[in-house]
Amino acid sequence: MECPVCKQRMQVKTIEDVKVDVCESHGIWLDKGEVEALMEVAKKRGEHEGLIKNLSYTMDVY
Ligand SMILES: [Zn+2]
């Protein structure tokens, strides 16, 4: 997948068993299913607060 902003190929990383696309310049990009999967994990653990903030941002962009 390419970054919607800079059109560069993004790295695929696995966070909590969810595959996400990461642009070095613009952060994490997710489709809706991936966002929900990560939110679930974060809710259960009470972790990744910074990540959730990031996700909210990328959701707005989508
Ligand atoms: Zn980018």
Image: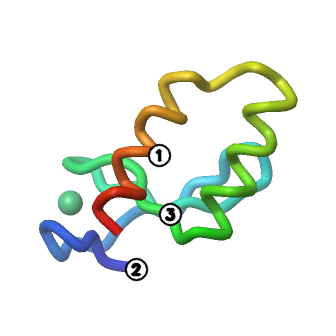
Q: Which mark is residue 55?
A: 1
Which image quadrant is residue 39 in? top right
Q: At numbered mark 3, what does the secondary structure look like: helix, strand or loop?
A: loop
Q: CA distance from mark 3 to mark 2?
A: 10 Å
Q: Which mark is residue 31?
A: none
Q: Which quadrant, please, contains the N terminus? A: bottom left
Q: Are marks 3 and 2 in contact (CB under 8 Å)?
A: no
**Up-down: is 45 above or below 30?**
above
Q: Residue at x 79, y 53 (%)?
A: 17
Q: Nearer the viewer, mark 3 or mark 2?
A: 3
Tell me how the rendering is colored. rainbow
**Up-down: is 60 above or below 47?**
below
Q: Nearer the viewer, mark 2 or mark 1?
A: 1
Mark 2 crowd level (few <14, some 14–19, many ≥20, 10 Å Cα):
some
Q: Position of residue 62 (x, y in %)?
A: 35, 69
Q: At numbered mark 2, what does the secondary structure look like: helix, strand or loop?
A: loop
Q: Residue at x 70, y 21 (%)?
A: 47
Residue situated furthest right in the rendering = 44
Mark 2 residue's CB less than 8 Å from ligand 1: no
**Up-down: is 12 above or below 38?**
below
Q: Are marks 2 and 1 in contact (CB under 8 Å)?
A: no
Which one is nearer the viewer's eye here, 35 or 15? 35
Q: What's the amino acid at mark 2?
A: Met
Mark 3 residue's CB less than 8 Å from ligand 1: no
Q: Reading the chain from its start, which is encountered first: label 3 or label 2? A: 2
Q: CA distance from mark 2 to mark 1?
A: 17 Å
Mark 3 crowd level (few <14, some 14–19, many ≥20, 10 Å Cα):
some
Q: Are marks 3 and 1 in contact (CB under 8 Å)?
A: yes
Q: Residue at x 29, y 62 (%)?
A: 61
Label 2 sits on residue: 1
Q: Position of residue 28 (x, y in %)?
A: 41, 51
Label 3 sits on residue: 30
